[in-house]
Image: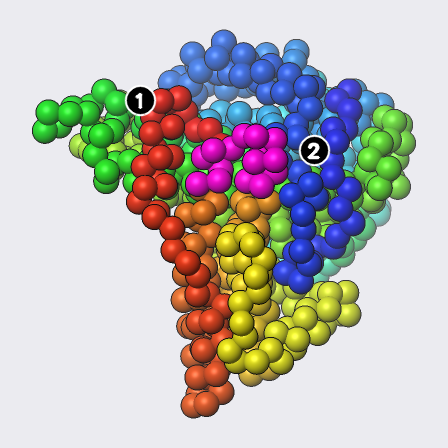
Amino acid sequence: MTTLTDIPRQATRGTAFLIEDSRPQDIFTPEDLSEEHLAVGHMVDEFWANEVEPNLPAIREKKPGVAMSVLRKSVELGLTAMAIPEEYGGMAMDLPSLMVTAERMGRDGSYGGWHSAHTGIGTLPVVYFGNEQQKRKYLPKLAKLEMLAAYALTEPLAGSDALAARTRADLSPDGKHYILNGQKMWITNGGAADLFTVFAKVGGEKFTAFLVERNFPGVSSGAEEHKMGITGSSTTAVYLDNVPVPVENVLGEIGRGHVIAFNILNLGRLKLGPAGVGAAKNVLAICLKYAKQRKAFGSTISEFGAIQHKLAEMAIRIFAAESMTWRVVGLIENQMHGASGVRADASANASAAGSAQELKAIEEFAAECSMVKVYASEMLDYVVDEGVQIHGGYGYHQDYTVERAYRDSRINRLFEGTSEINRLVITGMPLKRAARGLLPLFEAASAVLQEPERQPKEAVGDAELSLVRSAKKIALLTLAVAHQKFGAQLEQQQEIIMNLSDIIMEVFAMESALLRSRKLAAAAGGANAADACAVYSRDAIGRVELSSRTVLSACAQGDELRQNLSRVRGYASHDPVNAIELRRRIARRLLASERYTA
Ligand SMILES: Cc1cc2nc3c(=O)[nH]c(=O)nc-3n(C[C@H](O)[C@H](O)[C@H](O)COP(=O)(O)OP(=O)(O)OC[C@H]3O[C@@H](n4cnc5c(N)ncnc54)[C@H](O)[C@@H]3O)c2cc1C
């Protein structure tokens, strides 16, 4: 079993970063991964090189049985059992180990889809919500891949609006079964899965989760969908035609299916962080090599400033996404396993109390999981797009990895909740917490609003730290003004919500990048990190200012608007750096190492 690494013990709450300061030593970063975590990473790397990579062409072409045979080989290494408690045949690994694996699996969405859907959204509903009998029956089989798992929430007429599901479950006259009828859509692993977590409404009303085996009568899959990317993952409809599901297979409580659906999605969203970062690092490494060998106008294209800008910006955004991701992994892992930091033994870990604590931790940081998902998926789309550009016409050809990476990337902004739905969570969560008295958001915001319009800048001696603090003030001010204007109706002002989410996400990205770069500097490392942070925080404050101006201009007019805009301008003002030179420096280091380095 992997033991817990030295996770910083910051006692914080979800979204409290908006009103609290953190120190570099408070956050978890990839540099804190233990020897054991790194060993997990090496093991997955080797497996990837020996078993996955050679089979990828066949997997992408959907050659029958290939993906499953590779997945079966991964059983020997425990890769299908990592999240399952030991007493049910699993390895009870900690969250960082799962995320280290997810980063490696992110290299290719076709194979990654099989692994991730089985070990994540497929298996975790049983781990977290199964009763003892259900865990004993299914988890050992899922650990050994004697059953392949899938998660069936979406329907043709209920995607983002999952609770509008039409699949229904009616109790049989003898009370022994629920009879399921309906259709699920876009189900990953749908073509091969043996066990589905299916969401259906009992009596057409109470949204509930069920464990449905493929061999129950009336379960069938549609044909494989023809997708834009991740062509080798299995995606099908699943039909439920008078399927008798034993009452023992109700997962969790009747009418509480939404708790399962949303908590499992939170973890899925977090996992897209390392997966996106892994995919982006891979593309950047390919681009660095290509740029060094492709010649134009008598030199390699790596010598052109325009190309260096792209390479550096790719690395800067990867750095921000990576810093956010691991910070959230640390926050959740810390909360999951208590202030002691000692991971509970296997049996206790498997207990209902352990699961409840883990679920609470995931729920607590739901907004942070959404931020990681949105940021990493949009970062990856930027990276693959510039990757194609660096390859010129060759980037448009199927023989080149970037062409596939470009298509594969696009799904990440759609599944596990679209970017829009996640942005609703990012702004909605702190507002809800504030309304419930769990987060003194409006108290902090009113302190900002009471600051004189021309507040002299705090002399903190660290320009980027000052920018982070200013960004927080802009976030609080903008949230408060929007809330004052629209009150409970704010959620209907979606353009405002989207802008507020962008501000909140940028604050988290800026702070995570800053804290990590300072932590690296304290350990005499992170040359790229320091330059990346200097560039990123200045670009980000510009984006924060723009989003804030958009919101403020929709909330007030005249003197009030002028005053608010003037405050924001004051907070956002900063001394510039020579971003062109800093990006060139980052690019030179990247080109020398031919891979992403922090
Ligand atoms: C390859 C692939 C694999 C998938 N795997 C699975 C799986 O394993 N299990 C599973 O259950 N599902 C899966 N899905 C489904 C996926 O989660 C949904 O496609 C996604 O949630 C969006 O739902 P939808 O496609 O119905 O889009 P819609 O909900 O129709 O959304 C259309 C557009 O409207 C926007 N929109 C919708 N509601 C709002 C709102 N309230 N405010 C603002 N904008 C809004 C959306 O953001 C989007 O831009 C998969 C999908 C794909 C393509």
Q: Which residue type carries mark 1?
A: Lys
Q: In the shown orientation, is residue 63 left or right of residue 401?
A: right
Task: Indicate yes or no whether the magenta region holds residue 299.
Answer: no
Residue that mark 2 sits on = 95
Task: Indicate yes or no whether the magenta region holds residue 527.
Answer: yes
Q: Residue at x 23, y 20 (%)?
A: 293
Residue 120, image quadrant = top right
Q: Provide the residue span drawn in magenta.
A: 516-531
Residue that mark 1 sits on = 289
Residue 560, relative to residue 406: is it above or below? below
> Mark 1: which secondary structure?
helix
Q: Are there few (<14), some (14-19), or many (20+) residues within 10 Å of tag 1?
A: some
The structure's colour scheme is rainbow
Residue 5, image quadrant = top right
Q: Position of residue 11 (x, y in %)?
A: 78, 49
CA gap between label 2 and label 1 equals 33 Å
Q: Position of residue 562 (x, y in %)?
A: 44, 84
